[in-house]
Image (cartoon, rainbow, N blue to C red):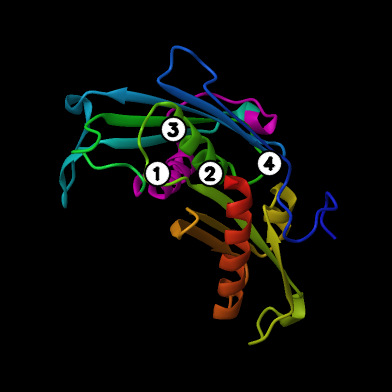
C-alpha cells in the first residue's frame, strides 16, 4: 500500500496554468500533488548566448535552463547562496529533456533562458520543471517541435529477493518523498509522446534487471501521456 492510497500506476492530482505574468515573455505553473514548479522563459538576442570555454570545448550555448530549489520548498530555512550540486544536476537533467525540442537557429534565432523555481517539493521537482518549462516555452511563442513531460518512477523489492535473478517487486508511478527515501529506486523519465529525451536513475540495491527497466519505461510512458493530455 502507498502512503496516500494511490494505485501503483496512478499520477497525483495535476494542475497547470500558463501566462501567469504579463511582463515575462513566457511563464507557467505546474503542480503535481505537493510539488509545484514555476517556470519563466526569457528571450534574448543572438549576442546574449552564453560563452563557454573548457579544455575540450569552446563555443556558445543558446538554450539555458536554470533550476532553483529554495529551502522553503521543503518547509526549511537556510541561506540563499549560489547553485549547489543538486541545483546544477537537476537543472542539467531538465535542460537535456527539453533541448532536443528547441527549434534550430535558422527557424528561431533567439537565445532562450528558462528558470524553474520550485515553490513546494515532495518528489520529482526536476520532472515538474520539464513540464513547467515546456508550458513556459509555448507561452513565450517558442515553436518547440513537440510537447514534453517528465515523471519519476520508483521500485519496491522484497529484501530477500533483491539479489536474485528474478526478484519480487512492485513499480511505482510518480513517487513522493517517503517512497524515494524508503524505496529502492528513483528512475526519472522525460520525453514526448514519441520517445524518451532524458533519463536519470538512482538505485539502492545491487542493480535491476532488463525486464524491470522495460516495465518501468512502459509505465512511465503511460504516465507521460496522461500528463500531456
For label 4, the residue is: 122
CA gap between label 1 and label 4 equals 21 Å
Mark closest to the chain's N terminus, 3 or 4? 4
Q: Position of residue 7 (x, y in %)?
A: 80, 58
Q: Position of residue 163 (x, y in %)?
A: 65, 82
Residues at marks 1 and 2 touching, judged by CB atoms closer than 8 Å? no
For label 2, the residue is: 126
| Prevalent SS, magenta region | helix
* Left or right of residue 146, residue 16 in this image: right
CA gap between label 1 and label 2 equals 10 Å
CA gap between label 3 and label 1 equals 15 Å
Above/below status of 19 relative to 194: above
Q: Position of residue 56 (x, y in %)?
A: 16, 52
Q: Position of residue 58 (x, y in %)?
A: 14, 44
The crowding category of the residue bearing disc 4, from other C-alpha atoms within 10 Å (few below 14, some 14 to 19, many at least 20), is some
Closer to viewer: mark 3 or mark 1: 3
Q: Quadrant of residue 61?
A: top left
Q: Residue at x 38, y 28 (%)?
A: 141
For label 1, the residue is: 95
Amino acid at each position: 500500500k502507498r502512503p496516500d492510497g494511490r494505485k501503483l500506476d496512478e499520477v497525483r492530482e495535476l494542475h497547470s496554468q500558463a501566462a501567469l505574468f504579463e511582463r515575462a515573455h513566457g511563464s507557467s505553473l505546474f503542480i503535481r500533488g505537493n510539488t509545484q514548479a514555476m517556470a519563466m522563459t526569457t528571450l534574448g538576442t543572438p549576442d546574449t548566448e552564453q560563452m563557454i570555454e573548457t579544455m575540450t570545448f569552446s563555443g556558445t550555448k543558446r538554450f539555458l535552463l536554470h533550476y532553483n530549489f529554495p529551502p522553503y520548498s521543503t518547509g526549511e530555512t537556510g541561506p540563499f547562496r549560489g547553485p549547489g550540486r543538486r541545483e546544477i544536476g537537476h537543472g542539467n537533467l531538465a535542460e537535456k529533456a527539453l533541448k532536443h525540442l528547441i527549434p534550430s537557429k535558422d527557424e528561431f534565432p533567439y537565445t532562450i533562458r528558462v528558470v524553474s523555481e520550485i515553490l513546494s517539493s515532495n518528489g520529482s521537482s526536476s520532472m515538474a520543471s520539464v513540464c513547467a518549462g515546456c508550458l513556459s516555452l509555448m507561452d513565450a511563442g517558442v515553436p518547440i517541435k513537440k510537447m514534453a513531460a517528465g515523471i519519476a518512477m520508483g521500485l519496491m523489492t522484497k529484501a530477500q529477493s533483491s539479489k536474485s535473478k528474478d526478484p519480487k517487486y512492485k513499480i511505482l508511478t510518480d513517487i513522493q518523498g517517503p517512497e524515494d527515501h524508503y524505496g529502492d529506486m528513483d528512475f526519472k523519465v522525460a520525453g514526448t509522446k514519441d520517445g524518451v529525451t532524458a533519463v536519470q536513475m538512482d538505485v539502492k540495491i545491487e542493480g535491476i534487471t532488463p525486464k524491470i527497466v522495460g516495465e518501468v519505461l512502459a509505465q512511465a510512458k503511460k504516465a507521460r501521456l496522461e500528463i500531456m493530455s
